[in-house]
Image: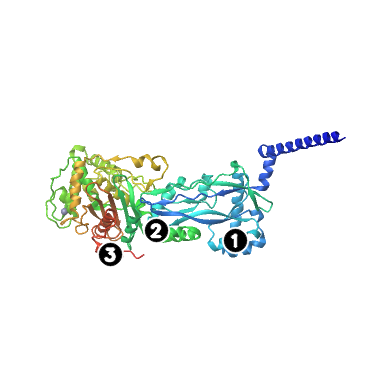
Amino acid sequence: MQDVHKNRSSVFVIGLSFIFLLFLYRIGTLQLVDDKYEKRAINNALNKITLYPARSVIYDRFGKIIAKNAASYDLFIFPKEEKLENRLFIQQILQIDSNQYNKLLTEAWINSKKRQKNNAYNRSAIFYSNLSQQQYTALRENLYRLSGFYIEPRTDRAYEIFGGAHAFGYLGEASELLLKEDPYYQPGDLVGITGIERYYEEFMRGAKGIKTVWQDRTYKQRGEVQDEAFNYPAKSGPDFYATIDIELQKFAEELFNGKRGSVVAIEPSTGEVLAFLNKPDYNPNDLVGQDRAKSFRKMLIDPKKPLYNRAVKGVYPPGSTVKTVLALIGLQEGIIHPGSTKGCGGGYRMGNIVVGCHPHGGPLDVVGSIRISCNSYYCGLFREIIDHPKYGSTHNGYRVLEKYWRSFGLGDPTGIDLLGESSGNVPTVERLAKRHGKKWRSSMVISLGIGQGEILLTPLQLANVAAILANRGYYIPPHLLKKVNGLKNNGLKQEYRTKKIIPIDAKHFETVIEGMSQVMKPGGTANGTGINGIEICGKTGTAQNPHGKDHSLFIAFAPRNNPKIAIGVIVENGGFGATYAAPIANLMIEKYLMRDTSSSKQFMIDRLKTTVLEPQ
Ligand SMILES: [Zn+2]
């Protein structure tokens, strides 16, 4: 009996074990292969929650943090679970009226449907992004009774140092178009809109992660799904080192106080942009967090155009700064030699047309013509080049000249890592024909010889010309990315590692550079603005402006041998090049090269900081 009982219970145990094993197996298959189960589970109790990565921290070239990440919180909603009785409370916390509430709810419905389509099992959608600290606290404390709502953390920008706003750019919510084009983005996501934030968006943004959670019927989270296939962590954007020297940048901004215009400084040997300034500009901290949209709308209609990136979009006549380029072309083509002299007599005359020049002794050779910036010399040289018999015709001669100009990066985008760069303007023979008639002659386009008329440059192109002069005949396209550790070639594209060669011999550069060095010396057009102990080579420009006072321009590089910095400056309505643009460039050069020493021209700094040309 005992045995029988024992046997029976054994059978019972074995049977039970079998059932249990079957049960385990069934659970296994349920989780692995039972499609029906999975669908049911998904529809009822799983929610995929996006884990937002931190964006790349942006550093300057010396490792100073410029932009980092700050915690921010978004309010999400399951629209179906939303309850009428909670509306007033939420409206009060978010400080919105019932119309705005309804609008947000409608949007959430739409987005929730879209997400379901993409994700199969996520019915939540963003309701309100960038909660303020108070809103976050008030909501978090009451979430338990706010059916359908939950809060998710993400990050937004926080700026440690303000400066270079147009180089770094700003973030904004993903546009409808982007949401349509790229399934990576969800409504409410922050993306780079301008600057390097936009250009390098794909690695700055990092990669989102996913956390899959079980939920009960009231959408309360009941723990994570413990399966790697359902969960992966967010991946931060890699550290981004920009080429900007933020100390130099801030110094430039101080000197530009009360002025309008642009400065670009470049390390000639690498094409790295050291400073990139537009004035007016904006405080990048105004374009983060809750006030982003409001500030942005205000800036858009601001008549001072703080969002306008004139360094790459603004076009200006380069004036006398490009006499340097014309001299090089004349020398290379053998039309002049360093000792070729020309007289002046107060201006260049062609029939009854006179291009004026300021009083100076003559005649001048190439070096002297740069030092004094003689208009007659360059009107004469311009005609000698394009009218030269060896080219067969003036128009062919002009085509040769145009080709040289383009080799200097004029008339085409430089290729900087920013979107929306202008080409500036270098007119073709055909364009000139439209303006001056098919049979146009050199006398009709004579102002091109002194950087006026149809020739237009961006401040970036102007700085790039300075870099070419510094390099004695080549440039690397200017760029704002210095390095991203861990990426091949530090993340630098091939074109930012490749020299573009100008077809002009180095010896001709030495002639022009001697003239540029004398610009800062007695008798030179920027005498008195130089810096003790640094041989700066520069060239002034004063560009006629049909809308008002002349623009003040200057290009420069230093030191003369083995240059470390090249710079282009435009001060709108600043008058003569030597008045504002030259001292700003020279002080920036001093700052960059002599960093920790106090300035030898403090009075010049004080004057610039306090001279207001444009009320701001
Ligand atoms: Zn002259």
Question: Residue 242: horizontal and vertical position, in percent?
Answer: 38, 49
Q: Are marks 2 and 3 in contact (CB under 8 Å)?
A: no
Q: Which residue is mark 2?
A: 162
The image's colouring method is rainbow
Q: How many marks?
A: 3
In the figure, is residue 206 to the left or right of 400? right
Circle 1 packing at 10 Å, graded few (<14), some (14-19), many (20+), is: many
Tell me which amino acid carries mark 2: Phe
Tell me which amino acid carries mark 3: Asp
Viewer-proximal residue, 611 or 587? 587
Circle 1: element type: helix
* Residue at 13% across, 45% down: 340
- In this orientation, does residue 182 appear? yes
Question: Residue 613: horizontal and vertical position, in percent?
Answer: 31, 64
Question: Residue 122: horizontal and vertical position, in percent?
Answer: 62, 48
- In this orientation, does residue 387 appear? no
In the figure, is residue 565 to the left or right of 120? left
- The answer to which of marks 2 and 1 sits earlier in the sequence is 1
Viewer-proximal residue, 564 or 15? 15
Question: Residue 128: horizontal and vertical position, in percent?
Answer: 56, 57
Mark 3–mark 1 distance (CA, rounded to whole Å): 51 Å
- The answer to which of marks 2 and 3 sits earlier in the sequence is 2
Looking at the image, is 26 positioned above or below residue 466?
above
Q: What's the mark number on residue 606?
A: 3
Circle 2: element type: loop
Dividing the picture into quadrants, the one containing residue 431 is top left
Position of the C terminus, as image quadrant, is bottom left
Circle 3: element type: helix
Q: Which residue is mark 1?
A: 139
* Residue at 68% across, 47% down: 44
- The answer to which of marks 3 and 1 sits earlier in the sequence is 1
Tell me which amino acid carries mark 1: Leu
